[in-house]
Image: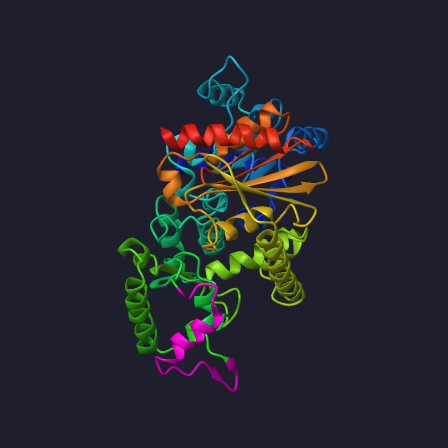
Amino acid sequence: MHARAKEIADRLRKASQVHIYCHIDSDGITGGSIAAEALERAGIPSKVTFLKKLDTATVEAIKNENPPLAWFCDLGAGALHLMEGMDAVITDHHIPTEAPAPRSRRDLFDYIEASNRILMLNPHDLGRGSDDISGSGTTYIVAKALDPRNVDLSAIAVVGAVADMQEQEYRRLAGFNREILEDGVAAGVLEATVDLRLFGRETRAIHKLLQYSSDPLLPRLTNNEEACLAFLLELGLELKTEEGWVTWASLAKSERRLILSELVRHMLQHGATAAEVERLVGEVYTLPREPSGSELRDAKEFGTLINACGRYEQAEVAYRVCRGDREEQLGMALDLLRAHRENLVHSLDFIHGIGVTKLTAIQYFLAGDKVKDTVVGITAGMILNSGTVDRDRPIFGFANAEDGVKVSGRGTRELRNRGLDLAAVMREASRQLGGEGGGHSAAAGATIPYGSETEFLQIADRMVTEQLRG
């Protein structure tokens, strides 16, 4: 990883200008901000463009722009076969595409490296997986190769990794992410502690923390506000002060221990498994230089704020916040976060209203224009983790987009361990219909032509059946 990062850093130093292209999700925006900050510190001119996807048309448009050097952050691996003739570096963690037949994937890498025009840093190229490091993490490794003093950028890289759910499998960051975390702790920009894993430790009222818990699901508490309030009040806790609702971060350690021990007892009493109870606690990541109670202090909450901007075509706002703007741009980001939450509530209400349809191995919903295409994946994931649908089937959500129908698939860790590979499903099913797709094994997406939803579902259902049977 470090040897390839050094090669990329050397290429960047020689460039007259670098055009950064990054994805609009949290991992992409954090990666883009790390790249831009590192280049600015090195005195290398750059500009940034945010992309919803990197398909054939987008790559051709970039070729027409003919940047002196293109830097793709959190995308690019899935478009390697389109990049012949480009001068580019790629810092990504998605599964690289196969080369056009009859070449193998290794042949493609050999061709690209031999041409000396495209360099890629990707864990898959080293036999590792997408959860070993994020797109922002590979970008950080290059930033560190440019200048070792860029270790302070590790905090934003960890935000990107956590937003990409890279800590979920083991309830802590692992693989190459561990090195980035250690850099941040040593630099004083990150803290890692074992604590309650639920989202909203810094900003949510405690009963809301429990009410919206999905990993794990809390029996009789998840999605039940009254039950959550009663549970906490029975413990004798003061839930509200003159300043407002009490948050998890503001509790005394003894109060946190009390809630945790009672949550464990409650879960076991109501049929939760030991593995489910274990998921209450894990490693959590704090940015100590951000104010207490801020949406920027907890890595999960910071990632959600960034995501809210990107999904509503305001990636530039999140990018500015990542690069240090704590005035106007942060205020805009907080407004976007509030709007994002309201939109998700409406999207969830709509899906619950129309219901989810089951096939042999998958389940799906057709949202049409009722759910924004940029949040259909988030909505699908929330539905799958809501406790109201079958978690033994991956879920596919469909929403209309400008260039076709956006498909987002989400699965669980358990399904992935049984052989589910949604990235393969999205690539193959969309290819057969004239579309494009890819992603991760438990979270992937595609764009397909209007009216081809039924055919897509038939292909996907057959492929998932075969994957899970295997």
* Closer to us: 456 or 251: 456
Q: Which residue is found at the position 62% from the left and 25% from the top?
A: 433
Residue occupying the point 72% across, 40% down: 402
Specify whether residue 206 is in view: no
Which quadrant is the C terminus positioned in?
top left
Which residue shows up at 41% across the image and 30% down it? Answer: 467
Q: Position of residue 379 (x, y in %)?
A: 56, 51
Write down the region rendered in magenta.
220-244
Q: Is residue 237 magenta?
A: yes
Please provide percent x and percent y for residue 197: 39, 61
Residue 29: x and y, percent?
58, 49
User: Image quarter for residue 64?
Assistant: top right
Say left or right for 164 vs 23. Answer: left
Using the image as rendered, state which of residue 448 and residue 353 is in the foreground: 353
Numbered marks: total? 0
**Residue 257 magenta-drawn?**
no
Of the pair 380 and 444, the residue shown nearer to us: 380
Pick the residue in front: 233 or 111. 233
Q: Is residue 465 left or right of residue 274?
A: right
**Which quadrant: the N terminus?**
top left
Residue 431 can be seen in this image = yes
